[in-house]
Image (cartoon, grey):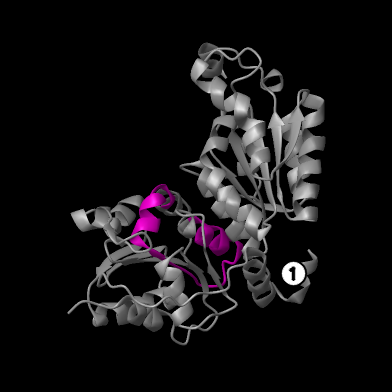
Amino acid sequence: MDWPLAVHQVLSQHRIGVVGYVPDAGHKRLIELCQADARMRCVVLSTEEEGVGLAAGAWLGGERSVLLMQSSGVGNIVNALAMVRECRFPLTLIVTMRGENGEFNPWQVPMGQATGEVLRAMGTVVHQVHAAADVAAQVEASLRIAHGSYCAAAVLIGQRVIGIKSFQEQANQ
Amino acid sequence: MSLHRRDVVKTLLAERGELLVVAGLGSTAWDCTAAGDHDLTFPLWGAMGCAAVIGLGLALAQPKRRVLVITGDGEMLMGLGSLATIGVQKPANLSVVVIDNERYGETGMQTTHTASGVDLAGIARAAGFASAVLVRDTAGVAALRKVVHAAAGPNFAQVKVAAEKIPLVLPPREGVLLKNRFRAALLGAGAALE
């Protein structure tokens, strides 16, 4: 199941013009697909918080965006989500999970276990995905609810979908 | 003689034409409001550290319009990484102006890093901005106004101003109002239906 290809098609259909990202191994292929798409401006960020500002500015200018990040980055965007909620900016987060389902790095576990709760505490609609076949549909659902209800929505792509179990496998990707 | 922040911002925003403005939280938002509340100014009441990247998003979405971020030294210090991000994207229509009083003005005038010599213009230059200047006098402010309105960016300026407590001039607070009035003025009334 080539879920990144399916997600890229959904982003394209929804006229996403700006793609902010902090790289994650799980997002490697989707980032490459977006970079190869002339209609998407890909913006590498130094921290995920920048992506929330980027999305807000893009929306002020009439452009739709998504933010690609790892679950640890959710900890970096909490205060910026206050702006999203107060201003009712549409914001779609595509989050690859760490710190769950056989995680090998104990430092990832606390933030990974708190990711959904932290997002919900800040008013984000959370979609959990545990199968590759469901990712694109849940990204589409997130885009629809974010733009339909003027809110933040996140897709949490579970570690079972990403399937990385060790540093060695990650390095070989 | 030191520059006064309200004079600097008033000069930069005089006859602003089609300029789109993002104002960082605190004193710079009050400065922009004192220069004249405007539908095409998005003043922040939070999201400290995000002003410059909001400007980046706006500049990428509206490549034919000039975009100006006016923010404080404390706000810019919280988002230093965004200078690197802007340096990579190189939006020609974006300028970031830091009104640098070397203080956290809203919390008791505690000194910021710039009071100890941290060189924000140097950081912006090293990050890849097309221009990055330190401004200390009225001639420099007049030159900066031209850069903001016409020069190919991204442009950065660090404008040293007096550390002074001056009256608050507050913009509207409600985020939805600020967002919707900006989008309606820029994109037309139909933007509310998107």
Residue at (68% x, 57% y) in the render: A88
Question: Closer to the camera, B177 or B12?
Answer: B177
Magenta residues, as a range? B53-82
* A85 to A134, vertically: above or below: below
The x and y percentages for residue B185 are 66, 77
Q: Quadrant of the C terminus of chain A?
A: top right
Res. A2 image quadrant: top right
Q: Quadrant of the N terminus of chain A?
A: top right
The residue tagged with tag 1: helix, strand or loop? helix
Tell me the kind of residue under disc 1: Ala
Is residue A155 toward the left or the right of residue B79 in the image? right
Q: Is residue B55 magenta?
A: yes
Is residue B100 toward the left or the right of residue B61 in the image? left
Residue tagged 1:
B191
Report the residue that reaches farthest toward the left.
B1
The x and y percentages for residue B181 are 66, 74
The x and y percentages for residue B122 are 26, 56
- Number of marks: 1
Question: Closer to the camera, A41 or A119?
Answer: A119
Q: Estimate how packed mark 1 is, as few (under 14), some (14 to 19) or many (20 or more) residues with alpha carbons within 10 Å.
A: some
Res. A142 image quadrant: top right
Res. B130 image quadrant: bottom left
Is residue B154 toward the left or the right of residue A22 in the image? left
Residue at (46% x, 63% y) in the render: B25
Q: Chain of mark 1?
A: B
